[in-house]
Image: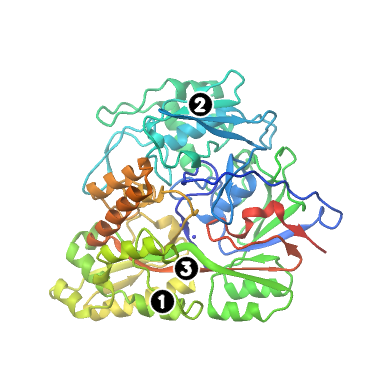
Amino acid sequence: MSNPAWRKRALVVASGVAVGALALAGCTPSAPAPDESSADASVIVAEVNELTSFNPNTSQANLDINSKIAYLTKSGFFYIDDEMGLVPDESFGTMEKISDDPLTVEYTLNEGLEWSDGDAIDADDMLFAWAAVSGYFDDYTLDEDTGKIVSGTQYFDVAGSTAGVNTTEVPVVSDDKLKVTLTYGTPFVDWNLLNLIDQPVHVMAEKAGVTVEELITAITTTPKGDPAAPVTPNPTIKAVADFWNTGFDVTSLPADESLYLASGPFIVDAWAPTQSVTLKLNENYKGDMNPSYNEMVIRFIADSNAQVTALQNGEVDVINPQASEATLETLEGLTGIEVLQGAQLAYDHVDLKFDGVFADANVREAFLKTIPRERILASLIAPINPDAEVLNSQIFVTSEGAVYQESAAQNTSDRFAAVDIEGAKALLNGATPTVRVLYSSTNPNRIAAFEAIQASAAEAGFVIENVGREDWGAQLGSDIYDAAIFGWISPGVGNAALPQIFAAGGGGNYNGYSNARVTELANQSQFETDEDALNKIKFEIDRLVFEDGYGLPLFQSPGLIAHTDRVQGVTYMANQTGPIWNFWEWTVGE
């Protein structure tokens, strides 16, 4: 699950090669035809943090704002609606399961699709997407205690998990290069959420210094990686993976336009660093998700009050600020503004790294006993939602109801129901460990949580060092901190978060957490199609991570969206895509 004022990491991104879960059938609604009042209009949307990469699928760039830009500029086989249903985009292509045994899926592109530079979108692009997300070529082995690579090669630094997709064979390509057939070695619960399109293959080949033909040959002929017998890395695949991992990370609009090619309705047109990104219509877009306006401006406004002021003054049309009592009261007092509220599929939490000071299980437990979760909830969330409660699960959020309650009742979270300074002191036995805490130094909620934790932990003898910073997201997994306060936000579908966060070596396992049973269960979850059996897996993971002192969840985040009456069609969206999930359905007045 990303702020300068409300920054969260995404559990899995909602575009590109995102992997989620079960789907609902449906069809893509046609966009309203442009009319004279809106065809030349511009819509201005406020976001709390700035774009950092045109590839949100890597572990360091897996931020919600990066995914939102990708959502606006990249097409795919489906999208997720505000009911968390999977909606096919048949104006791009079709995805069809053609066999259960073995599980076999066909992806078929429509004819005539193009990237914004005019290059055709074809099966080579899908082959590259498969290579990037599948982990097929990886032959690395992890240390069971540290979760770090001790031998072999990991090619693509995928933010999520390759579990499930890594059982597939090399895809079979049709003669017309519009279809690929993907065959799995085992059942895969999230097969229908593998959106087999990513970066343009012709760009990736050029950046690797090879031709498309040479890259495709490398992908289709290089043997599957075997951790038991690692080999010298394939130079072509290694070169393309190295660029994919970092080459799309940016701080301003690149002179190289190939780094932000579009296949969707919009393309990035301008970027004023720290101010805004402007998107214009992609003239080569052939799909049905055409907006009835010709420009979207994403303004970077970190402060919630500043977002509200900009909305009130007509400087922006849509905002999605950090929810607070003051923000909500101000918005409800404005005329011509619609306010939308709900629970976010997001939660704030404190994670502990499993090296350094927290390599000692007693120190981990002692620190967790000092975290004043009720106090944090009462000051930050209860004023907005009086019914809010402390979150007592690492897997489920409170809005999931019975399944959350069942997991919380058995996961031993009750050990941390209240602050226990004396218990923490007993575990420390006179020691005064120094703990460096990382968080967003521009996020009021994270600042308040840090200060509450700092004061409480000091009572038990901890020395808390403030390492909060603006670029906290880029520091996750680094050695500058021992504990981190941040948030995850989910796409609302799928089970990919389990291996992503909790399996050793997972793309979001910034803790260095490694428990062989948890890794086994997290990977097993990707193949379990029975809901009851899957929930049992989740319950056991939830219990084990609490027992190991992984960290503590704090609260499920409240959500808040507001828009002027100039823009119609905006609905509340709880997942990481936020209000732009149906941007092509918006209508714009004068």
Q: Which of marks 3 and 2 is nearer the N terminus?
A: 2
Q: Which of marks 1 and 2 is nearer the N terminus?
A: 2
Above or below residue 360? Residue 387 is: below
Q: Do the residues labelled 1 and 2 touch (CB within 8 Å)?
A: no
- Evaluate whether residue 153 shows in this view: yes
In percent of the image, x 70 and y 60: which residue is there? 569
Give x and y (percent) for residue 584.
70, 51
- Per the model, the C-alpha gap separating discs 3 and 1 is 10 Å
In percent of the image, x 41 and y 47: which residue is there? 496
- Per the model, the C-alpha gap separating discs 1 and 2 is 49 Å
Answer with left or right where residue 25 lies relative to residue 503.
right
Give x and y (percent) for residue 475.
40, 57
Single out the mark in the foreground, 3 or 2.
2
Above or below residue 120? Residue 546 is: below
Q: Which of marks 3 and 1 is nearer the N terminus?
A: 1
The residue to which callout 1 is attached is 377
Circle 3 SS class: strand
Q: Residues within 10 Å of mark 3 (few under 14, many from 20)?
A: many
Identity, as a three-letter code, of the amino acid under mark 2:
Thr
- Residue sitting nearer the eye, 539 or 232: 539
- Residue sitting nearer the eye, 200 or 584: 584
Give x and y (percent) for residue 420.
23, 78
Circle 1 SS class: helix
Identity, as a three-letter code, of the amino acid under mark 3:
Ser
Circle 2 SS class: strand
The numbered disc on residue 490 is: none
Answer with left or right where residue 126 lies relative to residue 424.
right
